[in-house]
Image (cartoon, grey):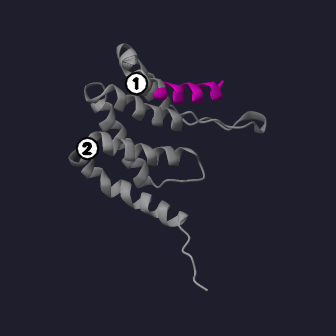
Amino acid sequence: HDFVKVEATVLLGYLAVVHTEACRPAGARILQTLRALVFQPPPAAAAGGGELVDVRGPALESLCIVGKALGREAFQAQAEELMRFVADAHRAGLDFSDGLSSYIMRAGARLAGFLGLEAAQPFMQALLPPLLQRIAAEVQPAVAS
């Protein structure tokens, strides 16, 4: 059931990009549904040791993609709200042992691009340090022999 939600949220993003005009009449409802998934509580531990699926990350990514496809008029207010959420998550510290943190980091970049330099500027102090730390952690300097 949760895997189906994850796949559906990802497909909504693709659909909105490819068929923006067809999605426009339902745009507000699509954005509202994805937002509700993003802000739902994290899933409880899976009973019986089953695999835990968290739809919040894919929903966040799809929300950014769909919102950008639908345009400023449809997405501006939610983009600003999401940017505050993303910046707060960055300030609190991202834990990359969970899958959500990578989605949050990507959402920050997508939202900054959507909002533009002036509107995104107040959030850069929260977004850039964790991004640079993550890049530095992935880069292993080569040692010359």
Residue 8 falls within the magenta-colored stretch:
yes
Mark 1 — residue?
A: 31
| Residue 65, picture quadrant | top left
Residue 46, by quadrant, is top right
* Image quarter in which the C terminus is found: bottom right
50 to 117, vertically: above or below: above
The answer to whether mark 2 and mark 1 are in CB contact below 8 A is no
70 in the magenta segment: no
Q: What is the C-alpha distance between the residues marked 2 and 1?
A: 20 Å
| Coordinates of residue 29 in the picture (x, y in percent) | 40, 17
What residue would you read off at disc 2?
116
Q: Residues within 10 Å of mark 1 (few under 14, many from 20)?
A: many
| Mark closest to the chain's N terminus, 2 or 1 | 1
Give the SS element for disc 2.
loop
Q: Which of these two is toward me, 140 or 127?
A: 140
Can residue 39 be seen in the rendering of this structure?
no
Q: Main secondary structure of the magenta part?
A: helix
Q: Residue at x 42, y 52 (%)?
A: 90
68 above or below 98?
above
Q: Amino acid at mark 2?
A: Gly
Residue at 29 percent of width and 24 percent of height: 74
The residue segment tinted magenta is 1-14
Q: Give the percent coordinates (x, y) of residue 130.
A: 43, 59
Look at the image and tell me in which quarter the N terminus lies: top right
- Point 51% across, 48% down: residue: 101
